[in-house]
Amino acid sequence: MDSNCLFCKIINGEIPADKLYEDDDFFAFRDITPQAPQHFLIIPKKHISGPSAVTDEDDQLIGRMMRVGAEIAKENGIGDNFRVVLNNGEDAGQSVFHIHMHFLGGRAMTWPPG
Ligand code: DGP
């Protein structure tokens, strides 16, 4: 828990969010600026600033985040056609420094990303 972190505030209810899922380890909610018909974020309750701050003690947590996110995608009608994005660092587009997986679906995607 980082008292200055926006996503920690969403986890503890200080800032409202359109919640899709919660368990002891994870919280998932719709992105406030959706980039696809379906766009949600899954975050661990443990404050980790981003992908490059993941340590070996997080291996299981981050693996499970992928699996739980895919289940939420399925439950929300995205099926098996979705894109998962993790931004690391400002130049990569990271704006919130609490690790999050974006799940985007409901439309065809292009490559390369911008
Ligand atoms: P990134 O740019 O990868 O750090 O993604 C951060 C995402 O978080 C971005 O797509 C917008 C979303 N976001 C930022 N603030 C809020 C908020 O207060 N509520 C919700 N639901 N999403 C937010």
Image (cartoon, rainbow, N blue to C red):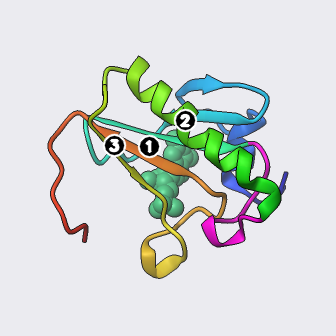
Q: Does 89 appear above or below 75?
A: below
Q: Is residue 83 left or right of residue 93?
A: left
Q: Does the residue labelled 1 lie within 8 Å of ligand 1?
A: yes
* Residue at position x 45%, y 42% in the image: 31
Residue at the location (62% across, 46% down)?
A: 63
- Report how far apart the C-alphas of labels 1 and 2 lie in the structure: 23 Å
Residue corresponding to mark 3? 104
Q: Residues within 10 Å of mark 3 (few under 14, many from 20)?
A: many
Looking at marks 3 and 1 on the same chain, the residue that comes earlier in the sequence is marked by: 1
The amino acid type, in three-letter code, at marker 3 is: Leu
Q: Nearer the viewer, mark 3 or mark 2?
A: 2
Q: What residue type is labelled 2?
A: Arg
| Mark 1 surroundings within 10 Å by alpha-carbon count, few (fewer than 14), some (14 through 19), many (20 or more) | few
Task: Answer whether residue 46 is magenta in the image.
Answer: yes
Seen in the picture, residue 105 relative to 74 is either above or below; the reply is below
What's the distance in space between the residues labelled 3 and 1, CA to CA? Answer: 13 Å
- Disc 1 residue type? Ile
Quadrant in which the C terminus is drawn: bottom left
Q: Name the residue under label 2.
A: 67
Assess disc 2: are there few (<14), some (14-19) or many (≥20) residues with their C-alpha within 10 Å of its C-alpha: few
Residue 89 falls left or right of residue 103 = right
In the rendered image, residue 103, in percent from the top left (x then y), is placed at 41, 42
